[in-house]
Image: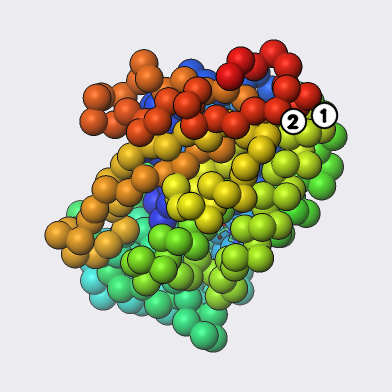
Amino acid sequence: MNPFLKWAGGKRWLIPRIRNNIPTFSTYYEPFLGSGALFFLLEPKAAILADMNPDLINCYRQVKNNCPSIIKILKRIKGDKDTYYLIREKFNTERDRIKKAAYFIYINKTCWNGLYRVNKSGKFNVPIGRSSSENSRVFDADQLLKASRLLKRAKLKCCDFEEAVKDSRRRTDFIYFDPPYITTHINNGFAEYNSVLFQHSDELRLAKLAEKLARRGAKVMVSNAAHPLIKQQYDGVFFKTEIERPSLIAGDPNKRSRFTELLVTSFPINLESQGSAGNRPKHSSARESQYRPSFNPKCKR
Ligand SMILES: C[S@@+](CC[C@H](N)C(=O)[O-])C[C@H]1O[C@@H](n2cnc3c(N)ncnc32)[C@H](O)[C@@H]1O
C-alpha cells in the first residue's frame, strides 16, 4: 500500500525501480522511518520501525492502537485556511496523544509540501500548502485502517538509528537506512527534519554501523545523495548504484532540478530492466560496485 503521510525525502519514487531487488527476509528494520514508503510497500510480517521525531512516532503508535478514534477526529476537521492555522496551533499545545496524532495527520496533508519543520522552541511552523481548500481530501479512512493493521505487526521506537537496530543479529534481517541527506540540505536550505540536525559525524557513524551489520550477514540497504564524500564512506564492501531523479523539495518549481541518488547495498541489484530510459541508473551496479571476495563469495563483480 502507499504511505498515508507525505514526507520530505519520502521514497515512493524509488520503489518501482527497486521492488524486484528486495532480498527475502524475516524481520524488516527501517530506522529512519519518515513516511515508511518501503515498509508500506513490503507489508512485512515482522518489523522494527524507528525515527527520532517523537510526533511522527506518536502518530504511528496511535494509528496502530487507536485508529477509529483518529478517524472520528479527522472527519470533523475542514480543509480551509483558517482551520489549518487553528489546528496547527492546537497541535503545538495538545497533550492528548490521540488528538495530537490526528492533528499531525491533518497538518501533514494540508501544509506546504508535507514538510515537517519546527522553530527553536519546538513549535511546528510550516504554512498551509497552496492546493489546500475546504474540499481537500486530507485522509482516507480505509487507507488508515489498513495502515493500522500493518503497524500491528511492527514494533515502533522513537530513538536514534543505532539504538533501533541494536537487536539485529540474524542474517535474515533486512535493514533499510534512509537518513536525512546533509548534502541536499546544503543546497536547498532545508536542514530541519527535527530540531536536532543530522551531522557529518552521524553520516560516519551510519556508514560504520552499516558495514558492521553487513559483515555480520544482514541484508543492508542505504540511500543517500551521490556525493563524493558519501560514496567514499561506503568504499570497500558495498555495491553502489547511482539513480537520477527530479528533486521535488524546492518551493519554486523553476528551481526543481535533477538530483543523483546513491543506493548502497550489501547485495547486488539490477535496475537496468526497470523504469523508463530517462530514469535508468547512471552507472550499472556492476560498474560502480566494489567487492571484497571474503565478504560475499556468491556475488560476481
Ligand atoms: C529521508 S527521511 C526518511 C524518509 C522515508 N524513507 C520515507 O519513505 O518517507 C529521514 C528521517 O530520519 C529521521 N532522523 C533524523 N535523524 C535521525 C537519527 N539520528 N536517528 C533516527 N532517525 C533520524 C528524520 O526524522 C526523518 O524522518
Residue 1 is tagged as: none
Badge 1 vs badge 2, beta-carbon distance below 8 Å: yes
Label 1 sits on residue: 170
On the picture, is 129 further left or further right than 108?
left
Residue 5 spot, x, y in % from top left: 43, 49
On the picture, is 21 further left or further right than 188?
right
Residue 277 spot, x, y in % from top left: 24, 25
Inter-mark Cα distance, 1 to 2: 6 Å
For the N terminus, give its image quadrant. top left
Residue 148 spot, x, y in % from top left: 57, 39
* Quadrant hosting residue 82: bottom left
Which comes sooner in the sequence, label 1 or label 2?
Answer: 1
Q: Quadrant of ligand 1?
A: bottom right
Vertical placement of 165 versus 2: above or below?
below
- Please name whichever residue, 170 or 149, is drawn nearer the observer in this view of the structure: 170
For the C terminus, give its image quadrant. top right
Vertical placement of 74 versus 103: above or below?
above
* Quadrant hosting residue 268: top right
Label 2 sits on residue: 218
Determine the secondary structure under disc 1: loop
User: Mark 1: which amino acid?
Assistant: Arg
- Please name whichever residue, 41 or 25, is drawn nearer the observer in this view of the structure: 25
On the picture, is 103 further left or further right than 149?
left
